[in-house]
Amino acid sequence: MFKRLLLFCCLWGCLWATGCRQETAPKYRIGFSQCTGNDDWRRNMLTEMKRELFYHPEMQLLYKDAESDSKRQVQQIRELLAGKIDILLVSPNEAQPLAPVIAEVYRKGIPVIILDRKAATDSFTAYIGGDNYNIGKLAAEYIAGQLGGRGRIIEVTGLRGSSPTVERHQGFHDALVHYPGLQLIATLEGSWVADKTQAAAAQHDSAIRQADVIFAQNDVMAYSMYRYCRARGMQHTRFIGVDASPYPDAGIDLVSRGVLSASLLYPSGGKEAISMAADILAGKKVPRNTLLQTVLIDSSNVKLMRLQIDKIQAQHQEIENQQSLLQEQRSLYQDQLHLLRIVATTLCIAFLLGIVLFFILRTNRRINRQLKQQRDEILQQRDRLVEMTAKAQEATEAKFAFFTNVSHEFRTPLTLIQAPLENLMDSRQLSSTQKHQLELMHRNVIRLMRLVNQLLEFRRIESGKLPLKVTEQDLQVFMTDIMEAYKSIAVKKHIDFRLICRQPDIKAWFDQQLFDRVLYNLLSNAFKFTGDYGKVHIYLEKPAQTDEVVIHIEDNGAGMDEGTLAHAFELFYQSRETAHKGTGIGLALSREIISLHHGSISVKSAKGAGTTFTITLPASPTPFAPEEIQQEAESMNVLNHSLFNYLEVPEEQPLMPAAAVAEHPHSLLIIEDHPDLNSFLSDYLGGLYEVFHARNGADGLQLAFRHIPDLILCDIMMPGMDGIQVLETLKKDIRTSHIPVILLSANSSEEQRIKGLQHNADAYISKPFNLQYLAESISSLLNNRALLKDHYIAEPATRVHADQSNKTDRRFINDFTAIVEDNLGNDQFGVDDICQRLSVSKMQLYRRVKQLLSCNVNDYILDTRVKKAKYLLLNTQLSVAEIAYACGFSSPAYFSTVFKSRSRQTPKTFREQLHKKP
């Protein structure tokens, strides 16, 4: 009887515990058939559904992807129907083919929610989708705003007959009616995919070349049109897409990279679909049509959107982690509850099972501790993984930014060098030496352009997608060609540059183009860090009984400390101990290239003792795969390397000849970071003034201190030191405080104008500005400054108490005149003494005195001495010779000559005439 009761209680406890477990099993089955959108959009919808399902554990999602095949989608819906689903979610690719099966499911009493695209039937419970008509309308209005109401547009539509295509097209056309200046010159059918978009674009190539804006009904087609246009050299066209998915090479990423001008956010509706399904299953009434709102994302808000999306994704990730942890805790709780109920049931049956219960409880505690410890370890590992992922993301973003910036910064100046060089090379009036030099420069420009394009191949090397084509080469001949480019800089710096090879015919297997870059990086670094009268030696050798070639590149330059040496081959690493800053990619790229060649590269260096790089290369084709060996020898010219990309050669300012100064009595300094505007203003004002120009605030200050111009034009928004900082520095320095400054800015707000004038700007001109207004403003300021000069030329008493001058100018004039007057009796007194006392250069002194007194320094000193001599002749009985020496003249004869040239009479005659007057 006891055994039967015990067995019954155990079975009852097990069934009780099993029933508790079944309470948490999914209660509803949700069928979802998807056939629309690109991969990113489908992934976004599915991700939103899964996230929302975390809040509805009673629901189970059965997912089917028809991959844009309507027939397959019909079959999948029937399979879901056979699986006894409680509700159907369907995203149809086409409206007509899906209508019968959707109506069939609806007639069987199963609720149907249609997502994204409509079907040609009224037999459905609810529809959730974006407001496609409003999307088309917003796109047209944005294009009108960007083009100023005038321009040519091409529209790329989706799959013909689908509801988003029709509605977006209708909204776009209805909005264009209000802008007669916008012309829709072509409509292409891209069917939502890239390959069909490319094919349609090829058929409308002439129209595309005329288009100002291309509006595609999704981002995939917009990006496909962008690549089509850029591949054919069409740079002026703008692109606008729809979807704005937050994935790489998707809408938001393309807008942030400047590929797309804008993208309209098309919500997937995944979250809303699960939420509505839960309401339907709960018996709540839901709206039949739900239109999701959209928002336009362009350069003005893409950063904010990315930050918000990243934050939301991080929050969702945290929620998922918490849900996973909660699920583990629920499972653990159910296990514990199940065990406790069995033990409690067993204790009620017999006291003898108490001993067993004791051991079970003790074991359970030990398991709990282990589980807790394991859970803590898992949480710590998760935190470390999150941190590592964030760091990896930051590194990836830094690399992408680096490649983009380098390509952008190098291409423009190289193009501006190449085009004038080619024009000069076409001239028939060049000597053979000049022609050779121009050809050398041209080859190096082409070489640099190629190197810029090859920077992006580092990513290909990392991903293993860079093909290797090796051939057997005479290493000594190859090195000699490379060294040719560095001989001129070696001569200029008196560097002992030589190739040392004691074995003839040393050959190695390598890819010429890739290995060429390794040598360029190493030799560039060697010359960069080796001072004058140093050495750069290259050693070639082939060790006996080995199948490899060894190259040593040795210099006696600055060397590297231990910290820098440890990170020498680390990507993007830059040492803080040197003034030479590179990109941080050269040595890392060299290591990857040598690794591709099945070789090795190492470095030995010490601070102040030079550096030696050692490279090993295979001397036979054995390590290479057959596809890595170039079958047919191709002609390969090793182009000379440009040496000026790492040597900072200061730009020499041309000395203005006297005739040019006489022609342009006033000088002007232009500080503007925009190169085109800088060049235009220089050309426009160059006919009226002597013009100096700078591209940033620091260079502008150097030119201002060096040349002391009569007026300065300065932009406000500049990288590094802005215009306000430049203005403050100029006004605080005694050398430049008198110079009038005109501020240029695209910010025309009153607050910005007041801020500029508060910092003692003489004028504030907003962009865009009238050139005549600018010229008249400059002329007016210079004329007013001329009046100020006339004021300073007055007698000393008037100058000192002048109200029109500022404190800095008055202090300079007072100091200058005091120094001159204190040294009038010194015949050795000159300009050098004044410069030393005022702590200014001769150039600055001459310009400052000329601007304030309209005379040069020597004339002022002579005039002052003559004035003092007149006073002494009139009020003392000193002889002419004594007065000459008292006024600092080296001899009475020289004094008489200067006095006569200034007063048109001799000192003796001047004294006699004054004494004869009553």
Image (cartoon, rainbow, N blue to C red):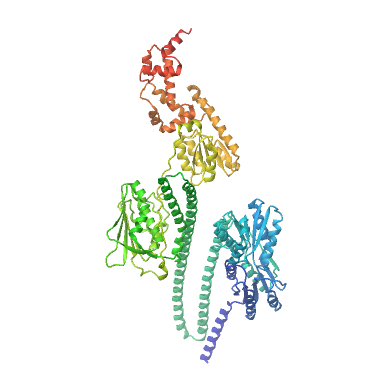
Q: Is residue 349 above or below residue 68?
A: below
Residue depicted at 57% across the width and 32% down the height: 780
**Is residue 563 visible in this depiction of the protein?**
no
Label tally: 0
Q: Which residue lies furthest to the right in this view?
A: 122
Would you identify the image quadrant in which residue 189 lies?
Answer: bottom right
Which residue is more in the foreground, 918 or 447? 447
Residue depicted at 38% across the width and 14% down the height: 880
Q: Is residue 235 above or below residue 715?
A: below
Would you identify the image quadrant in which residue 47 lies?
Answer: bottom right
Residue 270 x/y as whole percent: 62, 68
**Is residue 667 visible in this depiction of the protein?**
yes
Residue 630 x/y as whole percent: 41, 66
Q: Is residue 290 above or below residue 892?
A: below
Residue 480 placement, left or right of 300 = left
Which residue is more in the foreground, 174 or 662? 662
Q: Which residue lies furthest to the bottom in this view?
A: 1
Residue 384 x/y as whole percent: 45, 65
Residue 908 x/y as whole percent: 41, 12
Which residue is more in the foreground, 711 or 442? 442
Residue 360 placement, left or right of 323 = left
